[in-house]
Amino acid sequence: MHDHHHDHSQCDHDHGPKHIYIYSPSSAVRDKAAFKRGIARLKAQGHEVEVDVDALATHTRFAGDDATRLAAIHRAAASGADVALISRGGYGLTRILPGIRYKAVAKAIEKGTHFVGVSDFTAFQLAVLAQTGATTWAGPSLGADFGVEGEPDDIMEACFDDLLTGHGEGTGWRMHKEKPHATTGKPAVPNVYVKSATLWGGNLAVLASLVGTPYFPQVKGGVLFVEDVHEHPYRIERMLTQLMHAGVLAQQKAVVLGQFTNFKLAPHDKGYKLQSVVDWLRTQIKAPVLTNLPFGHVETKVLLPVGATVSLSVEERDALIYWGHQH
C-alpha cells in the first residue's frame, strides 16, 4: 500500500531526534488521555516534544478564543521546530484565516518547519498555498493518530518517519476493483501519466467552504485529492457539484478520492451509494477519477505534500503519486 522509494545515495539523511511542536488551532482537546499518549509516543521515539502553552485551552468548543488560537499558530511558526503538529482538527480555522501572518508561516516553512495536519487543518493548508505558494503536509494529528489506545498504524508511522528523515518521495496504493464501463467496455480508470502537477486538496467540506474566498488556491492542471467523514454520498456529490460549477474540477489533471467514512445510507436511497457518486462524476469531467487513496479520517493514512509538484501514474489498479525530495 505504501511505496518506499529510498535512494540512500542521493543525500545524507538525518536520523537524529526531531523537534516537534504541538499546538491547537481548531477545536478544544477533549480526549486528554489520547493527547498524553500521543506526546509519550513521540517522546519514546526519541523526539523533543514542545507543547504550546495553550494546547489545552478551551473557549466554548474551541481551543481558546480566536486571538489565542492565532497566537498559537504564530508561536508554532516561530518555534524553529522540524514539525508543527496539530493536536486535533474539528472546527475553528476558517474563522481566523484573515488574522494569520502568512509571510511568517511561509518563512518558517522555508527554514524547514513542516506543518502537518488533517480535517479542519485543510483550511490552513489551502490558505497558505493560496497566499504564499508554500507546501504543508496533509497527515496525522496528535490525538487521533499517535494517541490511539494500542499501537498507532504502522503505515502512518512509516510515512511520518519518512517526512522526519527526508525519505518521503511518494506513495503508492491499489484502487478499488471496479467494473469496466457498461457500454464501451473500457476500464473505470484508464492508464494515466501526469507529469509536473500541483498536488492539493484535503477535507472536501472544508475545501468547498473556501470557494470564492482569497484562501482558495487557483490551481490549474493540478492533482486534487479529497476525503470526508460523516457525510452522506448525496452531500459529497453536492460539494463536488459546487467545485464543478465553480470551474475548479475542469482545471484539474486528475481527481483522487480518499476515504469517505462514517456515513449511513437511508432506505430511500434505493441503490444510490458512494459508487453512484463516483460513476456520475466520471460522466461530468474529463479528468480521471481515482479511488481509495489511503488518506482521510482513518487510521491508515499517508502523508501528502499540499502544494508540491508531483507526478501521477496509474497502471490498471496501481496508482502512484511521486514527489521526489521536498526538502
Image (tube, rainbow, N blue to C red):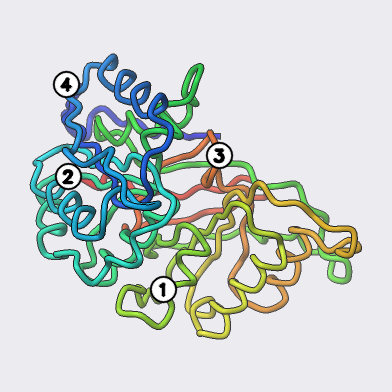
Can you give x and y, in whole percent of width and height, for residue 20 in the image?
21, 33
Residue at x 25%, y 39% (from the top left corner): 55
Badge 3 or badge 2: first in the primary sequence = 2
Which residue was labeled with disc 3? 298
Checking the image for residue 113, the label placed there is 2
- Given this view, does label 2 or label 4 mark the residue nearer the observer? 2
Residue at x 10%, y 59% (from the top left corner): 104
- Given this view, does label 1 or label 4 mark the residue nearer the observer? 1
Residue at x 79%, y 59% (from the top left corner): 273
Can you give x and y, in whole percent of width and height, for residue 83 in the image?
22, 39
- Crowding at dot 3, Cα within 10 Å, few <14 / some 14-19 / many 20+, comes out as some
Which residue was labeled with disc 4? 16
Report whether residue 115 is seen.
yes
- Given this view, does label 3 or label 2 mark the residue nearer the observer? 3
Which residue was labeled with disc 1? 210
Residue at x 46%, y 42% (from the top left corner): 171
Badge 4 or badge 3: first in the primary sequence = 4
Can you give x and y, in whole percent of width and height, for residue 37 in the image?
37, 21
